[in-house]
Amino acid sequence: MLDNAILAKAFRLMVTARCMADIYEANRQVCKYVHSTSKGHEALQIATGLQLLSCDFVSPYYRDDSLLLSLGFTPYQLMLQLLAKADDPFSGGRSYYAHASSNAADKPKIIHQSSATGMQAIPTTGIAQGVKHLEQYLPHLLQKGSNNENPVVVCSFGDYSITEGEVSEALQFAVLKHLPVIYLVQDNEWGISTTAREGRAMNAFDFAMGYKGLERLKVDGSVFEYAYGAMNYAIDFVRRERKPILVHAKVPLLNHHTSGVRKEFYRSKEDLERHQAHDPYLKLKNYLFENDFVESHIGQIEKEVFEEVQQAFEKAKQAEDPSPASVSLNVFAETPVKEERGTREPANGEKILMVDAGLHAIEELMQDDERCLLYGQDVGKRLGGVFRETATLADKFGMHRVFNTAIQEAYIIGSTAGMSAVGLKPVVEVQFGDYIYPGLNQLVCEIAKSNYLTNGKYPVSMVLRVPVGAYGGGGPYHSGCVESTLLSIKGIKVCYPSNAADMKGLMKAAYYDPNPVVILEHKGLYWSKVPGTEDAKTIEPAKDYILPLGKGNIILQADEAMVSNGESVCIITYGMGVYWAKTAALYFKGNVEIIDLRTLYPMDEALVFSTVKKHGKCLVLTEEQQTNSFAEALAHRISYNCFTWLDAPVEVFGALDLPAVPINIVLENAMLPTVEKIKERIEMLLNK
């Protein structure tokens, strides 16, 4: 038997949610931005939110406005987001209704929410992964409840999102690592217009049976007292046992899929009546009558709440819209690394390989910061990376800080959002650039957008290492370059070091940057085995050396006399292109100046443009397939900004437009830029 105070609070919240839904429906022209409401799901959501603590984490999905109300957010706050107002506390008018984010001290934390059709499972499981790590190894950094309660993590979604492959990756990791997470599945038997029979082989409860070690529970989520009891069990289980559980709750869908996809478009009268028979509002109201609540008192609550909600709506309508000047705020959090500092070439220093420079940088970071973790495929103790790029780290820092994952690029990337949210500093690796694509959904939808759509509350501090590039017959799936793909994603930074010193300095800067940074590491430069790449080995910088992102470097300067006579050309390049350009320049003594970009975003435009203006002739050199590449886009920017200084059109040279790098070395060389081909381009430019 539930306490009357809980029942009264739950009913008031349910009335609030129902009034909000009705007001939105009655004011469709005002509520013009797409939205969904919890109508039919209220009992389950309220039963969940009322039992969470401020030390907990929750990831609502787009239909969870009742959950948000039960966490303590007001109708006015939710309506500010509904109407995309400037004071929307979640996104500042940038995201959809009920796409919450919060770091309020008195409420459970909510990280960035995408449109939440399964994608939220990985970042939220990443939170649980982070909580478990803090609990076991850094308890002084773990926030507990006022009575020393352990935090729990709740991931809420609809049953249809269970069919997403990324949900399976999250469940697999949660079970494997015994993570303290509740997967709350709200099953209304619809996936927009697709029925359960059409779209799934089984419901979430049956699906969960395949994950050995995943506790599971099912409940009628339309009955508040049942839902409250089920969630009480689930929350208590996770707080005590520190293991995952899946709660499958059947609920009716009493409203539209969204305000734009209306129920009358696709649902039959019989289906609507069947769902209406399970209305949780009426069930809770009848339950109150059975437990001696006076009808007049219930009516008074309904009247009071309607007036409160109506007043909140009128107030929200009058709130200010965001200023156009705010549109570009919080794309990135400000980085503390703004200047190059430390010793790049210590006296009596020794040369090291580029692969070792990255290894040493991470070792030093792990020495200095207990929050630094490294994970990915094969980076752990047994192998230390397929390129030995993480060798010895697990031995030195333990397998709890340096560990392997399964082949789960989406989880590797997306989990960093959750890890970062609890204060950890993940460095992760995707084994080859060609294998990054399964992780792009997480990188684009969760990682890159987090800071912007939470209005600065949740930047994702992560470093993603990606070995790339062709050499020696690596073949179609171990040789690709992916910078153009990555640079189309706004909200991430991209580095591409070409030597050991830059690798170490950029790795440090990337780590201390509070934003997501991808480091593309050409595996042909790791050991300087490719002819002409000996200079990728450099004196190892001191531990204090750091190289800010966005600073290019003049690798080779042209002779001033050649420049004055108009007999010079500049090559703008990066990665392996630096060494192709340097070797080709040997045939043009004093005629060639080479810029190594080092960071592709942010890019050192000032250095690039000033260099082009100095020479008047420019070749942009890349290893990527040329058409529609970053290099071609850069050539346009150069042409636009340096047009009146140009003596010839900006040239671009990249690989042939083939779908993959052939494994045969003869074919590989035929595809890629080579020194001989670059010599021809330089000669052509010099003769213009």
Image (spheres, helix red, strand yellow):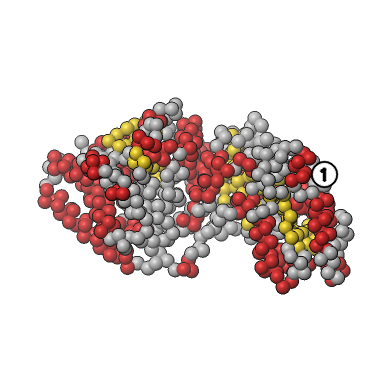
Q: In the depicted view, which residue is nearer to us: 217 or 685?
A: 685
Residue in view at x 81 percent, y 59 percent: 682
x then y, percent, for residue 561: 87, 69
Examine the rendered structure and indicate whether residue 14 appears above or below residue 306: above
**What is the quadrant of the C terminus in the image?**
bottom right
Mark 1: few/some/many CA within 10 Å (<14, 14-19, 20+) = few
Quarter of the view holding residue 530? top right
User: Taking 409 as reference, is 144 left or right?
Assistant: left
State whether residue 367 appears in this view: no
Residue 495's x, y, as percent? 65, 52
Residue at the disc numbered 1: 531
In the displayed structure image, the side of residue 576 where residue 302 appears, left or right = left
SS for dot 1? loop
Q: Quadrant of residue 40?
A: top left
In this view of the protein, can residue 666 be seen by the observer?
yes
Q: Is residue 496 above or below residue 604?
A: above
Residue drawn at (32%, 37%), measured in percent from left and top?
249
Measuring from the top left, give residue 494's x and y in whole percent: 63, 52
Q: Where residue 330 appears, x then y in whole percent?
A: 51, 60
- Amino acid type indicated by mark 1: Pro
